[in-house]
Image: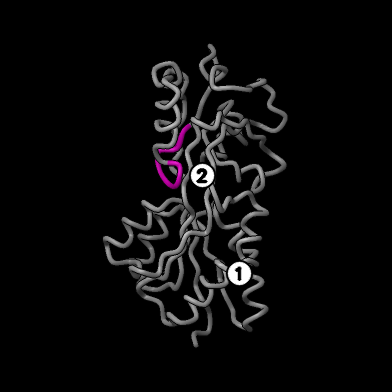
Amino acid sequence: MVDELKIYSAGAVAPPLQEAVGVFEEREGVTCRVIPGKPEALLKAIRHIKKGDVISCGAEYVHDEAEDIGVLIKGTRRSLGYRRSVIVVEKGNPKGIGSFEDLCGEGVRVGVAVGGCLKGVWDDVCSKAGLIERIRGNIVEHADACGTLMGLIHSGRVDAVFGWNAFKNVWPDTCDVVELPWDLQVYRSTAVQVISYTQDRQLSEKLIDFLMSPEGRAIYENYGWLHSV
């Protein structure tokens, strides 16, 4: 058995993972270290140092790409649940944004993600609504990951971003969410998978089994992850 299980995680999916890993550590008597960061940077680091046991990212395409470059073991990927797209605003919603139409208003500043688990989500949502042209003109900031996207809200650089319902549970003191109509929502899976360089595949898979157990899934549900759509 390895001395320490190294678990990499995209930043915005780390909170429930860290809580679940804490339970797993106590139960199994093992030491785990959760290393959060931007998916692209994590995968680059893993590929360079050739170390790591498990990784979790907030979109299946990230794991697809990692499999293609040989970083992850095919056949070990599982889905930990789904997140639903919403409009995220500053706590208290000072601009009174309550609908898609409000994002089209003059002077409304919108931020979108061009990397990470939210890459392309604004296009999917706005295309469904037929509002690409009107909303594109109000996009004033791009972010490369969920953390930097939320940084735009926290710093007041934008009035709204396209994010996930779980953001309200991850950043409860700094943001609120505005729900989208059901037919405009986008869902994405949060995946977990064994890294090709693991020194203990059996223990890594045991951790994933725990995350997929009713107890592990309940932790994710408490943070807003969904297990049906």
Of residues 14 and 188, the one drawn nearer to the viewer in this rendering: 188
The secondary structure type at the circle numbered 1 is helix
Q: Residue at x 61, y 61 (%)?
A: 217
The residue shown at (49%, 30%) is 184
Amino acid, disc 1: Val
Q: Is residue 19 left or right of residue 86?
A: right
Residue 31 lies left or right of residue 9; in this view the side is right
Q: Residue 211: x percent and y percent? A: 56, 67
Q: Give coordinates of residue 52: x percent, y percent.
A: 43, 72
62 in the magenta segment: no
The relative height of residue 150 versus residue 225 in the rendered view (above or below) is: above
Residue 116 falls inside the magenta stretch: yes
Q: Residues within 10 Å of mark 1 (few under 14, many from 20)?
A: many
Residue 43 in the image: state x and y as whole percent.
38, 60
The residue located at (67%, 47%) in the rendering is: 169
For the residue labelled by badge 2, is the local secondary structure a helix, a strand or a loop? Answer: helix
Quarter assignment of residue 122: top left
Instruction: Please give left or right for residue 116 compared with residue 88 in the image.
Output: left
- Disc sitting over residue 146 in the figure: 2
Residue carrying label 1: 21
Looking at the image, tell me whether mark 1 or mark 2 is earlier in sequence order. Answer: 1
Total marks in image: 2
